[in-house]
Image: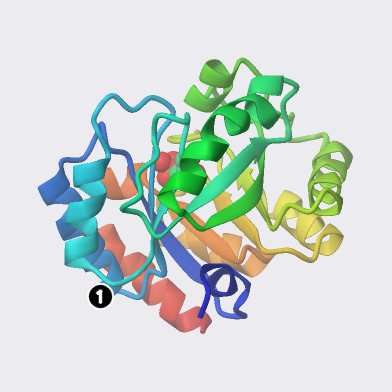
Amino acid sequence: MNLYSKFTSKNKKLALLIDPDKTSGIEAAKLAKNAEENGFSFIFVGGSLVTEPIDKLVEKIKLSCNIPVILFPGSPLQLTPKADGLLLLSLISGRNPEYLIGHHVNAAPVIKKYKLVTIPTGYILINGGKVSSTEYMSNTKAIPVTKIDIIKSTALAGEMLGLKLIYLEAGSGAHNSVSEEIIKEVKKTVSIPVIVGGGINNTKQLTSIFNAGADVVVIGTAIEKDQTLIKKLGKVLKNKQ
Ligand code: 1GP
């Protein structure tokens, strides 16, 4: 099965996000194993600002689990051939050319050399109730939650441009996760899989986000704070299959 088909499969999917600056290699390996045992489909690795080398971290995660380890990079410095693939993010909610195509030009030869499987992803930042690291680091604005037509058109334009996934991002540690209404509307608008992340802290939120139509849900901060959440989130996932 190729990597992209793991995103397009009908079943609901959970991804654990590991930020290399917040989690050591040993800890990341333990979390990844736990996530796999509880039905998670992917481990995403990345962050807005990563100062630790990610090679060794990815290597350690790979030794502890068999689910795909996918780079979710905040910058072209966060690349390693050790990963199974890469979400090649284009920040289509923003108007900063560096995050739309500039960094990609720098990264492309390295990605080719590393033979990384890439999945072109339309990354849409939606206001999560506070200024997110993504917003600050990318020097772009998040789309206001009330501008649902703009969010839908952005996702549709991404699909028409040939992007293969839409990622609705409220920002890591967001006060408000992406609303059910936004997820429902985007799902009605595009036919590619929709990933949702940012500020998801509990099973109730996860259930409503899955019910709204999210194909993949990404959780990082809440699990960093409470690892017992992995099992609880896994149970929600099981009930959805
Ligand atoms: C951030 O969507 C991810 O890019 C996950 O967010 O850390 O808030 O779970 P959290």
Q: Nearer the viewer, residue 215 or 50?
A: 50
Q: Which residue position is annotated with label 1?
A: 37
Whether residue 189 sits left or right of residue 40 in the image: it is right
Residue occupying the point 45% across, 46% down: 113
Figure label count: 1
Whether residue 113 sits left or right of residue 58 in the image: it is right
Measured as percent of width and height from the top left, residue 7 is found at 57, 68
Residue occupying the point 46% across, 53% down: 116
Colouring used for the render: rainbow
Quarter of the image holding residue 122? top right
Placement of 47 over or under 67, stated as above or below = above
Measured as percent of width and height from the top left, residue 59 is found at 21, 53
Residue occupying the point 42% across, 59% down: 15
Q: Nearer the viewer, residue 210 or 151?
A: 151
Q: Tell me the SS state at disc 1.
A: helix
Residue occupying the point 64% across, 21% down: 98
Answer yes or no: is residue 60 visible: yes
Classify mark 1: residues with Cα within 10 Å, few (<14), some (14-19) or many (20+). some
Measured as percent of width and height from the top left, residue 34 is found at 21, 66
Quarter of the image holding residue 21? top left
Placement of 67 over or under 32, stated as above or below = below
Q: Whereabouts is ligand 1, in terms of quadrant? A: top left
Q: Amino acid at mark 1?
A: Glu
Q: Nearer the viewer, residue 114 or 154?
A: 114
Answer yes or no: is residue 125 visible: no
Placement of 136 over or under 170, stated as above or below = above
Q: Residue furthest left?
A: 26
Badge 1 residue CB within 8 Å of ligand 1: no
Measured as percent of width and height from the top left, residue 44 is found at 40, 52
